[in-house]
Amino acid sequence: MWFGIGAGLAAGALWGLVFVAPRMVPSVGAVDFTAGRFVSYGLLAFALMLLAKNRTWPTWPQARFALLMSFLGFTGYYLLLVYGIRDAGTEVPSLIIGTIPLWMMILGKPAGLSWKALIPGLILTGAGLALMMTSSHGSSQTLSSGDQIYFWRGIAFSVASMACWTAFGLLNAAWLKKHTQVSATQWANWLGVATGLGALLLWAAAGSTPKELLAGKDIALAATLMVATGIGAAWLATILWNIASQHLSASLCGQLIVSETIFALIYSFAWDGQWPSAAQWIASVLFISGILASIRAHR
């Protein structure tokens, strides 16, 4: 169990990086950044599949499922998240994504877990999220109408992103437990190829032209971040998460996503070069306490 927990926490630390990366290159569009990141993941996964000694290719049903999961857990999820970060900043989207453990617990709840036991965690988590939204962006009275539109649009994108990954987490865990002959690395590579193909289609349909990309500002930094997050926060993190999914129940595994939120907040405040305000500290403590209360209820 502890091996699975360690793998899940490490995956969360890598995933936390993707909340800050888009803010480092604001001149690069959301579609371009998403496509670049996942094409990098797909190329690495395909190369590893070709170099593998015991090369195993997915069956057609497995390939179809990998394509679906690549949208829920990668291209669709991250594109929505990048739009959410661009409109609402880092802190609130990271907390919305951080509620995934609660949704996974509720939707994947073991038979012996009482609904009543989840109430304290839900209250604490909701209070932390509400306080962070208020402290990060001010009350609705102090925001201009334009800011409100962008902010709430970012919230909507973030909620949709959260829904995508919640579905991915539950379906991925169930599939891995059913197909024990597929290793965590194999599945990560199959997902990577499917994700890379989907990212190419996304870029072809809605991305910038190569000429526009090369002429853009900070393209070298953007390319570096795309490759780094594609390899570290996609390929490696997916292997670590698959290991966690194989060793832990879906509901307990989902609780480990709290590490993604914690690291995302740490990275965000470090990038901004400022300490959180008192209200943001309290919001973070409330949110994390809510997740921990849910973990205790699960155990």
Image (tube, rainbow, N blue to C red):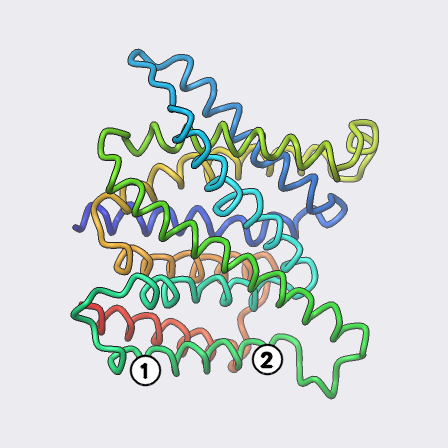
What's the amino acid at mark 2?
A: Ser
Sequence order check: which comes first, mark 1 or mark 2?
1
- The answer to whether 290 appears left or right of 284 in the picture is left
Q: For the point 79% across and 39% down, which residue is it?
A: 217
Nearest to the observer: residue 48 or residue 91: 48
- The answer to whether 139 appears left or right of 93 in the picture is right
- Tag of residue 161: none
Q: For the point 46% across and 17% down, which residue is it?
A: 47
Total marks drawn?
2
Name of the residue lying farthest toward the front: 61
Nearest to the observer: residue 59 or residue 14: 59
Q: Position of residue 236 (x, y in %)?
A: 40, 36
- How far is mark 1 from mark 2, CA to CA? 24 Å
Q: Local crowd at mark 2 within 10 Å, few (<14), some, or many (≥20)?
A: some
Q: Nearer the viewer, mark 1 or mark 2?
A: 1
- From what the image shows, is residue 257 above or below residue 129? above
Q: Position of residue 29 (x, y in %)?
A: 73, 45
- From what the image shows, is residue 42 above or below residue 146? above
Q: Quadrant of the C terminus?
A: bottom left
Q: Which residue is mark 1?
A: 119
Q: Local crowd at mark 1 within 10 Å, few (<14), some, or many (≥20)?
A: some
Q: Secondary structure at mark 1?
A: helix
Q: For the point 46% across and 33% down, which residue is it?
A: 64
- Tag of residue 135: 2
What's the amino acid at mark 1?
A: Ile
Which of the 4 image quarters holds residue 50? top left
Q: Position of residue 240 (x, y in %)?
A: 33, 41
Q: Secondary structure at mark 2?
A: helix
Nearest to the observer: residue 22 or residue 115: 115
